[in-house]
Amino acid sequence: MNADSFVLSTRIVKVLEKETGIFAVALKDPRTGFHWSLNACPMRSASLIKLFIMVEAFEQMKTAQLLSDTVLSFTESDRVAGSGLLQELPAGTSRTVWELVELMITESDNIATNLLIDRLSMSAINARIRSLGCNDTVLRRRMMDFAAAAAGRENTTSVTDVVHVLSLLHDGRCVNLEADSAMRAILGRQTDRCKIPFLLPAVTVCQNKTGELPGAEHDAGIVLTPQGSYILAIMSDALADSEQGCRAVALISRSIYDWYAEKTAGV
């Protein structure tokens, strides 16, 4: 373990010493190539899986398998609970593919996500995940299908897989420069700011995607600071409550921000 990894591990362990639950963290500095992770292993993905669905949507739009202005509508049988605006609208409501991707990321809309899974196909999404080199990530079920989850068909990912795909987006090497720029812009319109961005200075820009399930709170994104950018993923499970989990993720995020600011300032 090098000096930077030791300092980060020490700081994050200290943040977590009074927290209950399991936490995993991964960080990459794209400028230096520095990688660091703590407790990285496959975990329940919650809505972090939507990052990978977005990538496949943009890949299919790039190859014209799917048009961004294709209109999809949902039926009453498509209605699911959880996050999103579409669940408040009547059956038959339609949105373009581009609008569904935006809702899936910025509002974590579960109806939009399921419409995209059905249109893109689960097999194509998983093939894209494998092509990205993400070995811990699998899409096994639609959103809010708790019967499938109880039967063992749970969606999984890891902090290292998420940091990897966000690194590709940051560098413009995921789909292509235009698509990657568009995906980063969508992530930048994320409406849930209670985790990674919450304790950071107002000048900080976060292009992030959150996720939550009972007992789990996640967030991952590209963090742009006046000193430069870094890529961060934080996942948790077995939490006592969601508020505690969100607070812990925000504290981890701030600790990493402070480390990065010190490092880039040469402290």
Image (cartoon, rainbow, N blue to C red):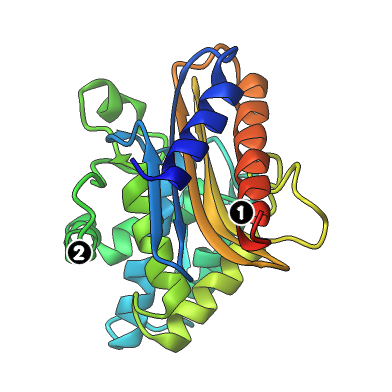
With 155 as the anchor, is 114 left or right in this view?
Answer: right
Q: Quadrant of the N terminus?
A: top left
- Residue 169 visible within the image: yes
- Residue 93 visible within the image: no
Give the secondary structure at mark 2: helix
Classed neighbour count for the residue bearing mark 1: other residues with Cα under 10 Å, few (<14), some (14–19), many (≥20): many
> Which residue is the site of mark 2?
124
Report x, y in % for residue 161. Answer: 31, 51
Give the secondary structure at mark 1: helix
Amino acid, disc 2: Ala
Report x, y in % for residue 185. Answer: 60, 73
> Which residue is the site of mark 1?
260
> Foreground: 56 or 248?
248
Q: Which residue is drawn at 62% across and 47% down?
A: 259
Report x, y in % for residue 46. Answer: 43, 38
| Residue 178 disc label | none
Pair 2/1: label in front:
1
Give the mark nearer the N terminus: 2 vs 1.
2
Amino acid, disc 1: Tyr
With 255 as the anchor, is 202 left or right in this view?
Answer: right
Which of the 4 image quarters holds residue 82? top right
> Foreground: 157 or 139?
157
